Amino acid sequence: MYPQKTSFSFMQSNTFRLMLIGILTLVLLIPLFLVQNLVEERKDRQMSVVNEIAGKWGREVFFYGPILKIPYKLYSDKNKNSFEIQYAYFFPEELKNVSNVKTEVKKRNNYESVVFNATMDFSGSYIVPDFSQKGIPNEDISWDRATILIRTTNLASIKNGVTIKIGAKDYAFEPIYDRQDNDSNYYDNNEMPNEVASLETGFINYQEFLTNSSFSFTIQYDGSKRIAIVPIGKTTESQLTSNWANPSFTGNFLPYEKQITPEGFNASWKVLHINRPFSQQSFGTLPNISQYTYDVDFIIPVDEYQQNERATKYGFLVIGLTFLIFFLIQSISKIRIHIFQYSMIGLALILFYTLLISITEHSSFSFAYILSSLMTVGLIALYSISILKSKKFPAFIAASLVALYGFIYVIIQLENYALLVGSIGLFTILAIVMYVSRKVEWSAAEIEK
């Protein structure tokens, strides 16, 4: 009788085990994807609450004015038998703005939104309007029917009666239906249309002010998120102070001087007419210049949901590397780990992200990240003791997971160097795996019968 030959079982090879682990990793992408959807849902809910608070308190403030508006006759034939009324728009020669913005944080459940009360003082002057470039004679100009126009958002949030003083006379602004199709909607930083409306004075006999056309007025807003002003003066100077310590300066023109402290900020702008692509006067229609603004954003500086979203994007990496650590320990120590046990470890890693987002909503992201990672690492380490029947390997696994979570936290916090640090870290991990796995037997295991 011949001796029985040694047989090989592919089902017990390291290659097959690695294939099962790979399939399980892909399957775990399903709950990871659901967690990512949860983060997105909570983020959308936050934006919904922020927009709801803004809708009740006051939305973004967009300001464009004051504009001198003078009607004139435009004849349709050479004999001047018929004509239509057109309007000429003149921007100030000088425009100065001093604004003080007081902010506060409104809370609803777990969500926060920044709102403010802004007091904006404007002053300046006009030069004598020039109609000569259009060949319009003085008798065709209705000087006595001139008005002052302001284009702005948030009429419902204006907190004072707005009156402009020209020379020694006061003129009250009134809301009018004057739809300008070219800038009827000003889009806020959430791409939500914020309707632009008009405030206009009654008729002014502007010939009375040709020698003294200085003006001043004050307007107060309740608003949120941003203030945007179009610098329409030939020379526009603006100064804005606030108790908000985390401003973001955006738009087409940045402040030439700013000071930011924990108590607030002070910023100054100076914009000349040669710095913008529009002239000081327009005939026929008011131009669309709503995109040429200098802006201040009043935002919550740390977006917790964005950090949670970035953390979940590394979920596949965490699961894959954790499984790889267990696989290498299994291959080196010859300890068998069932696929069910891998599944439990994978679900614990997924649960980390639900813990992270839920704790973040009641504290800071850093505290939530530390607490969630410690809970997850502790759970896996304790479970590993029962699997591996020792404390040496679980200690190594816990240390590896702490290093991995710490590495990912650093990447999340970095902006300019995230790609560099991430690439170096992944290269280091790959080098360690290649070194440790160099003696792993990938062929089928021999089983004597």
Image (cartoon, rainbow, N blue to C red):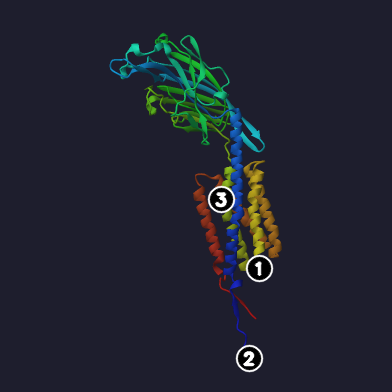
State the quadrant of the C terminus. Answer: bottom right
Q: Nearer the viewer, mark 1 or mark 3?
A: 3
Considering every residue shown, the one lying at the far front of the view is 81
**Which residue position is annotated with label 2?**
1
Other residues around mark 1 within 10 Å, as few (<14) / some (14–19) / many (≥20): few
Asked if the residue at tag 3 contacts the one at tag 1, i.e. Cβ–Cβ closer than 8 Å, the answer is: no
* Mark nearer the N terminus (2 vs 1): 2
Asked if the residue at tag 1 contacts the one at tag 2, i.e. Cβ–Cβ closer than 8 Å, the answer is: no
**Given the image, on which type of amino acid does mark 2 rest?**
Met
Compared to residue 53, the image places residue 77 above or below, namely above
Considering every residue shown, the one lying at the far bottom of the view is 1
**Given the image, on which type of amino acid does mark 1 rest?**
Arg
Q: Quadrant of residue 55?
A: top right
* Mark nearer the N terminus (1 vs 3): 3
* Mark nearer the N terminus (2 vs 3): 2
Could you say where residue 409 lies in the image, as x and y percent from the top left?
58, 48
Other residues around mark 2 within 10 Å, as few (<14) / some (14–19) / many (≥20): few
Residue 336 is labelled as: 1
Horizontal arrangement in the rendering, residue 420 relative to residue 86 (left or right): right
Res 116 seen here: yes
Could you say where residue 248 lies in the image, as x and y percent from the top left?
52, 33
Q: CA distance from mark 1 to mark 3?
A: 31 Å
Other residues around mark 3 within 10 Å, as few (<14) / some (14–19) / many (≥20): few
Q: CA distance from mark 2 to mark 1?
A: 35 Å
Question: Could you say which is closer to the camera, residue 194 or residue 211?
Answer: 194
Horizontal arrangement in the rendering, residue 233 relative to residue 111 (left or right): left
Q: Nearer the viewer, mark 2 or mark 1?
A: 2
Question: Could you say which is closer to the camera, residue 200 or residue 169?
Answer: 200
